[in-house]
Image (cartoon, grey):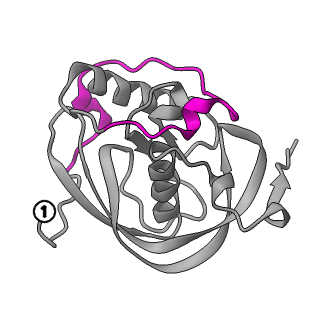
Amino acid sequence: MTAEYVGLDGWTPEALAVPGGVCPVVSAPDPLLSRPGPEVDPTSDEVVRLAADLVATMRVSPGCVGLAAPQVGVSAPVFAVDVTGHPKAVTVHGTFVLCNARVVEASRWKAGREGCMSVPDLTGDVKRASRLVVEGVLPGTGRPVRLATDGFEARALQHEIDHCAGLLFLDRVAGAHAIYQRKVYL
C-alpha cells in the first residue's frame, strides 16, 4: 500500500449482507486466546459470517468497544471495533471490521487502563501508542484500508490486534502492581 490514507469510504457492517449471530465469549485461560491465527481470505463466506458475528456479539455486550475472532473461539486475525459514544473517544471511525490488520506507525506512547471481555474480573495499566496507523482489509469487499487514528480508538485497535496475535492485555502490563480487580458499579 502507498503512504496515503485509504479510509472506510462509507463501509458499514450492513455491507456484509449476512445477519450476525451472537457468540459466546471465550475466557482466559483458554489456550485459544494465546494462539495467533493464520491470515484469512477476507472475501470468503466464512470470514464474512465471522465479521457479522463479531459485530452482533459486540453490539449486545454492554461497554464493549472491540471484539476479536479468538474471543469467540475462532483462531483468525479478524476483529470489530466501535468506540462511538465512549467518553474517552476523540477520533471515531464508527463500527468497522478489519482482517489481517497490522500496525504500520505508532507514536506518543501513554499508559492507560484496559479491560477485556475475555478477562472479566481484571483491568490493567497498559502502555500503548496514542497515535496509530493501521493497515488491514475489509471483509466482504477485500478492499485494503489504511486508517490513521489516535487516543482511545488507537488503544482499542492495538488491543484487538494483540488478540489476533495471541496476546491479552495482561501480557502487556508492567507487572502485578499494574493489575486491578474490576470495579462493579451498581
Closer to the camera in the image, 104 or 6: 104
Question: Where is residue 124 shown, x and y percent of the image?
Answer: 74, 59
In this rendering, is residue 177 above or below 15? below
Image quarter where the N terminus lies is bottom left
Q: Is residue 59 visible?
A: no
Disc 1 residue crowd, few under 14, some 14–19, many 20+, Cα 10 Å: few
Q: Left or right of 128: which side holds 136? A: left
Image quarter where the C terminus lies is top right
Question: Where is residue 56 shown, x and y percent of the image?
Answer: 46, 27
In this rendering, the count of numbered labels is 1
Question: Where is residue 133 shown, x and y percent of the image?
Answer: 33, 68
Q: Left or right of 27: which side holds 16? A: left
In this rendering, is residue 89 above or below 142? below
Residue tagged 1: 1
Q: At 59% across and 21% down in the image, what residue appears?
A: 24
Q: Is residue 33 visible?
A: yes
Say which element carries label 1: loop
Q: At 42% across and 24% down in the image, what residue appears?
A: 53
Asked whether residue 26 is drawn in magenta, I would say: yes
In the rendered image, which quarter is residue 7 located in? bottom left
In this rendering, is residue 177 above or below 60? below
Question: Where is residue 20 shown, x and y percent of the image?
Answer: 39, 21
Q: Left or right of 99: which side holds 111? A: right
Q: At 21% across and 54% down in the image, what residue appears?
A: 145
Q: Which residues are magenta?
A: 9-38
Q: What amino acid is found at the position of numbered circle 1 in the picture? A: Met
In the rendered image, which quarter is residue 4 located in? bottom left
What secondary structure is the stretch in magenta mostly built from? loop
Q: Left or right of 51: which side holds 175? A: right
Q: Residue furthest bottom?
A: 108
In this rendering, is residue 113 above or below 50? below
